[in-house]
Image (cartoon, grey):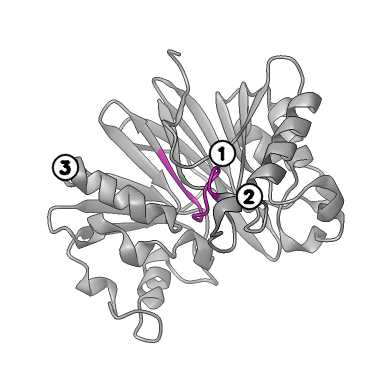
Amino acid sequence: MKVRFWGVRGSFVAAGGEFARYGGNTACVEVTEDDRRLVIDLGTGAIALGRALLAAGAEKRPLTVLLSHTHVDHIQGFPFFAPAFHPKSRISVYGPRGAGKKIDVVLDESLNPDYSPLYSLKNLSAKFEFHNLGEEPFSIQDFHVTAAPLPHGRIDSWGFRIAGNGGTVAYMCDVGYVDGIPTPGAIDLAREADLVIHDTTFGPEDWRSHQRWGHASWEHALAVAERAGARRLALFHHAPDRTDEEVDRFVALARAAAPRGLSVIGAMEGDDGVQLLGE
């Protein structure tokens, strides 16, 4: 199993040389194993991913998208996701109900003429299937997926545990724990995972003044990975004004505090990704 980061920022795109190394696009992660593929979140990183998929002829195989929630930075790449415009594409989207609305309704409204010239999902060429997330595990293309709601301010953001033949990855983005104490649900998702991808919008100092924002610090991410017995932690959802040097500092601090057996990386766009097993 391989994980590749196409978008690593939160809230809005970060532009400029200070953000070039880690990348400035909003959240989008690709999980592959053999010729099977899952995409998690459709931030602006999905634009480059979509182009790469069509260039590789991936429209010939079914594609599954998991949406953690529908805040704009997690779906803003959707209207520009190239497979959505290919008539041979078959795309299944799993996502939570937004404000009581089904996921297809939320995405359709995001394309209404006040926001987009596309007007409606009906104007996209791909064949879509939509599924509302629940807490029962399910299987997609031989991936076994567990989804669970995690606290994100006044709403929930869903975390995912994805298990394949080549490893297990846990994805927990836009997560903020009450008093900084990780929830049992988060630890369960990360249990003995080969890779935990976790929100690290804040450092410990600035998190204290932003506790109601629904995001975590690298200390919280480290606590989840350590308590879960995970192998590797990727600091993710970097604040849009967090420079490359500042992310480097977070990574160094987390590495120094990590227990033996837990490695720490900073999620970075444009590299070859993270190979979970068989390295």
C-alpha separation, residue under disc 3 versus residue under disc 1? 26 Å
Mark 3 is on which residue type? Gly
Query: Which residue is drawn at the image coordinates 45% and 13% (left, top)?
Result: 279
Q: Earlier in the sequence, mark 2 or mark 3?
A: 3
Query: Which residue is drawn at the image coordinates 69% and 27% (left, top)?
Result: 228
Please, what secondary structure does the residue beneath circle 2 have? loop
Can you give x and y, in whole percent of width and height, for residue 137 in the image? 46, 39
Q: Label 1 belongs to which residue?
A: 267
Mark 2 is on which residue type? His
- Residues at marks 2 and 1 touching, judged by CB atoms closer than 8 Å: yes
Residue 153 among magenta residues: no
Q: Which mark is residue 57?
A: 3
Quadrant in the rendering for residue 141: top left
Q: Badge 1, how many Cα within 10 Å: few under 14, some, many 20+?
A: many
Please, what secondary structure does the residue beneath circle 3 have? loop
What is the magenta range?
A: 20-30
Q: Badge 2, how many Cα within 10 Å: few under 14, some, many 20+?
A: many
Query: Which residue is more in the foreground, 216 or 137?
Result: 216
Q: Label 2 belongs to which residue?
A: 238
Query: Which residue is drawn at the image coordinates 39% and 45% (left, top)?
Result: 39
Is residue 99 among what the camera can see?
yes
Please, what secondary structure does the residue beneath circle 1 have? loop
Is residue 132 among what the camera can see?
no
Residue 27 among magenta residues: yes
Q: Which mark is residue 17?
A: none
Q: Earlier in the sequence, mark 2 or mark 1?
A: 2
- Residue 265 as seen in the image, left or right of residue 95: right
Mark 1 is on which residue type? Ala
Can you give x and y, in whole percent of width and height, for residue 197 in the image? 58, 38
Q: Earlier in the sequence, mark 3 or mark 1?
A: 3
Name the dominant secondary structure of the magenta segment. loop
